Image: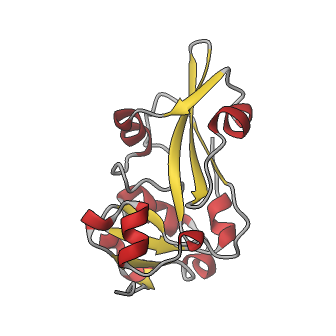
Amino acid sequence: MALDLVPALDAPHLLAPPTAAALAALPPSLAATVSVAPIDAALADTAAFCDAYEVRLADSANCIVVAGKRGDRVTHAACVVPATTRADVNGVVRRLLDARRASFALMDDAVATTGMEYGGITRWASPPSGASSSTVGFAMWSRRSSARASVARRSRFRAPHCAHFRASR
């Protein structure tokens, strides 16, 4: 089955609240280029999603949340990585976070830090207000348009490459 992409501005019910807020903050001309499609939440995991919706792994990306530690300081990074690539958590990500140690964030920490569903986390939004650690977001691929990055387990969206570089600390 194919994805039924619609303009994301016309389907806010398919977006996680932090993602909808981040989309609303984009310049209108850029926000208009973002599309979203409903999917079966049971097919949200990358391999199942790509198989069911006829999306090549090379055209898909995952967002992982990494916790970097240096002393008592913990910094989280939401990293967008091509589905065909392993994230270099202990190399690239650790250095970018200026951390002594880096590892995948625990599920509860990832959800609390991003305000999004596990399995539906995206780099599109800043951490909820009051989050105890900063979040650094960055993209790690050079495709012109990202594949279907996740916004909730029930949907996927596609955005131009430049939109993924919106990062805050």
Left or right of residue 9, residue 117 in this image: left
Residue at 59% across, 61% down: 84
Residue 125 visible to the viewer: no
Name the image colouring.
secondary structure
Residue at the (49%, 68%) spot, across then down: 24
Q: Is residue 45 above or below residue 51?
A: above
Residue 37 image offset from top left, x and y in percent: 38, 79
Q: Position of residue 83 (x, y in %)?
A: 55, 61
User: Is residue 59 positioned above or below 108 on the image?
Assistant: below
Q: Is residue 120 above or below residue 160?
A: above
In the rendered image, the quadrant that contains the C terminus is top right
Q: Residue furthest top?
A: 71
Q: Residue at x 66, y 32 (%)?
A: 90
Which is nearer the eye, 27 or 151? 151
With respect to residue 24, does 113 lie above or below?
above
- Residue 113 on image: x %, y %: 43, 38
The mark tally for this picture is: 0
Which residue is at the front of the view, 35 or 145?
A: 145
